[in-house]
Image: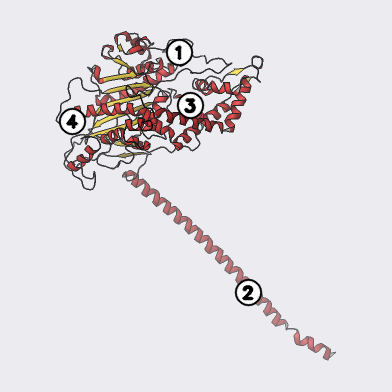
Amino acid sequence: MLLALKPQAQHAPSQTTANQLKHSRNGERCGWLTDRETDQTHVRMLARNLFILLVVVGAVLAIVSLSLQFFHLIPTTPMGEERPHQGQGQGQGKSRKRVIPVPHTEDPDPDPITEAYGYCNTPNRSEQSWEGHSPVDYKLLSVQVMIRHGDRYPLYAIPKTKRPAIDCTLSPKRKPSHPQLNSFIGHMAQGGRGRWEGTLSSLPRLPNHSACEMGELTQTGVVQHLRNGQLLRLAYKRHKLLLPNWSTKQVWVETTGRSRTLQSGMALLYGFLPDFDWSRLTVHHQWSTLFCGSACDCPARNPYLEEEQRRQYRLRAADTELERTYADMARTLGLPPRQLRAANPIDSLLCHLCHGLSFPCVSAGTALGSGGCLTLAQFAVIRRQQLEDEVDRRRVGLYRRYAVLATHPYLNRTANRMERVAKAYARGRKPRAGGEEAFTLSSAHDVTVAPLLSALGLEDALFPRFAARVVFELWKSPPATQGQYKGQGQGQNKAAWLKGERSKGGNWGDMFVRVLYNGEDVTFHTTFCRSHDRNAAQPLCPLGNFLSFVKKDMFNVLNATSYHNACYRQTG
């Protein structure tokens, strides 16, 4: 047994050895737990230190940002403001800063309903306008305005529906109203004392039907232009554009032969010149909606428009959602879709929307179709397609070519007026009594204003809303001081800079233009001034740029050098 037990005795550890081994292992386990807890403590301390560091850095950045804003080293508003360059001898009067609105970034998919309400231009809110703003000591010489008529009754009726119930007589007690509405009504009653060209004298000077006629100006349209005139009067009052004894030549008013344009023009003029003297006023007749005067003959113009209309048709025909919408509307009204399209329902639906009226309805018993009401969703589809059409129109470029030929006669007359005024105020010459045209008003249509915007290169401008306005201002800079022309080129002196201006269309080194659309300064978005250095010593757009554009540069898109060349080259 001793032999049998011997091997076992050789491999069994002693009690003391086993206890030591057990304590050794326990000690190792305890040591490992202590190291892990230490690492966790280090991580927590590191996280806390990083958090404290981020808080400190954030506080420092906030303090730096506030300091920069306090010292005007960074802009704090979306409007860019720059002080005009002042020479050593210039006065220290309060500066009217040069303000250039930052271009708006349009929503790539604008909401059709929101856009439609903007098109209505309901006069129920205050409006900020930038007309009349200039650097210090600049003199305003002339203002030329083109407007679209105000809100009107539809030109088309949707078959089998009731016409919108709108009263086209004027009443100061009915909204929307205007503080000048009552006196405007009384002043128009004296219109026989004025001079009216052609058939204008036979047109009513006020809308006057209790149930509006097709295309008639509404009270909303009158109020829109009373507000426009009031805005311009407040903007130009301090510039003394017109003295109380203004002459017949200094105020030029022209309109097409439609009552809505004549009445819109009268409303704006009255807002601008309250209680004006009828005996000094002549209202001129423009027989063409393009305001082309004696230069309307242009064989190449209409083919571009016809091709543009074919593009519009193809785009509409390819819109399956639009086709389904017209089919649904026609089914509701019991009409063939073709007949509904011909009635241009968007025109009447816009009138309902702008005046807060329910969309037209028909009962099932009075229609061959299902009956019911036209809906806002259907309106939105049609309006959405119109917005997409405007985008495609800009992309293709056919309309731009048409617009250049359509609006050149008006722009040429605008440029010629500016030249005459600039010559009258040339240095060393005293303006003659009576003066040149200081205020020109052209009352027109959407088919007039839309091509004007396109020809100027304002392709991103919204389609002209009711009572839209385009304003051209001519400014004269104060006498230049020595060194004011530094920086106009690579160290050019005054004589060299003026020589460059002469090459653009005359010696107009101290004459400048601004272009505004619905109160917003869009001068530096136009083709002729888009590349002008906004940080130049002269912060406005040189008149020479505009004159060169009208006389020659605007025809580059047609690969032509003049209006006559562009109009007759294809047929000659």
Task: Give the foreground label among 1 and 4.
Answer: 4
> Are the residues flagged by discs 3 and 1 in contact, CB closer than 8 Å?
no
- Horizontal placement of 496 versus 75: left or right? left
> Are the residues flagged by discs 2 and 1 in contact, CB closer than 8 Å?
no
N-terminal of the pair, mark 3 or mark 2, is: 2
User: What SS does tag 2 mark?
Assistant: helix
The residue type indicated by label 1 comes to: Cys
User: What SS does tag 4 mark?
Assistant: loop
N-terminal of the pair, mark 1 or mark 4, is: 1
- The residue beneath circle 1 is 168
User: Marks 3 and 4, how far apart in space?
Assistant: 46 Å
The residue type indicated by label 2 comes to: Glu
| Picture quadrant of residue 538 | top left
Residue 426 numbered mark, or none: 4
N-terminal of the pair, mark 4 or mark 2, is: 2
- The residue beneath circle 2 is 28
Q: Residue 12: x percent and y percent? A: 75, 84
- For the question of whether residue 520 can be seen, the reply is no
